[in-house]
Amino acid sequence: MTNVPLELDTHFRAAAAEEGLLDVAYDLVESPLGDLFVGVSDRGLCVISYEADPDAEVERLARNFGSRVLRSPRPVDPARRQLDEYFGGERRRFELDVDLRLARDFGRTVLEELGRVPFGEVTTYGALAAKAGKPKAARAVGTIMNRNPVPIVLPCHRVVGANGSLVGYAGGLERKETLLRLEGAILA
């Protein structure tokens, strides 16, 4: 096996992304919550993951989006910049295209409604179900939140239990609490 010089490797990855040869470009983005695995397709942001194993995330992306998945930082830069601004307290709303092609029907509707929950506010699973047209589907909404492909940007951390309790966050309740404190939805 031959080692490719770093400069050539970087150039190759950037060229592949610029020429539209990637199904998903990804990079690891540092955050106060730990490294985030962030992936972007030609349609927009398709994944933010707290997954500790990037190889497992790459395999999942290849199964769902196509085999041309490559670490290429440049396409991820707009998401990285907006996430940095959010964590720095400078951004309250994300302006990124989101690729929800894997979400179906009710799930897509729920994720679209989720994107409308304002910064610094919370809603409940039941209220989100009602806004999505199925008021008795709070449990289904919980499942959709657990599988949210782009947490933070689609703010599932803003969804709480009917009694206001912090429940059910795929990234862990500590991260959910941290995000809500950052937004002022929970007093320090």
Image: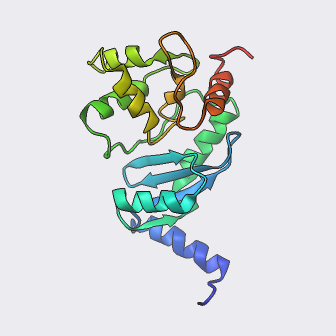
- Please tell me which residue is depicted at 47% across the width and 16% down the height of the picture: 123
**Vertical placement of residue 133 versus 112, above or below:** above
- Please tell me which residue is depicted at 61% across the width and 53% down the height of the picture: 52
Q: Residue furthest bottom?
A: 1
Q: Position of residue 92 (x, y in %)?
A: 58, 27
For this view, does 104 lie left or right of residue 148? left
**Vertical placement of residue 125 versus 8, above or below:** above
Q: Residue furthest right?
A: 188
Colour approach in the figure: rainbow
Identify the image quadrant of the N terminus. bottom right
Count of labels in the image: 0
Q: Residue furthest top?
A: 163
- Please tell me which residue is depicted at 55% across the width and 16% down the height of the picture: 121
Q: Position of residue 17 (x, y in %)?
A: 46, 65
**Vertical placement of residue 80 versus 90, above or below:** below
Identify the image quadrant of the C terminus. top right
- Please tell me which residue is depicted at 41% across the width and 42% down the height of the picture: 98
The residue nearer to you, when weighing 44 against 137, is: 137
The residue nearer to you, when weighing 29 against 144, is: 144
Q: Position of residue 101 (x, y in %)?
A: 31, 46
The residue nearer to you, when weighing 92 against 102, is: 102
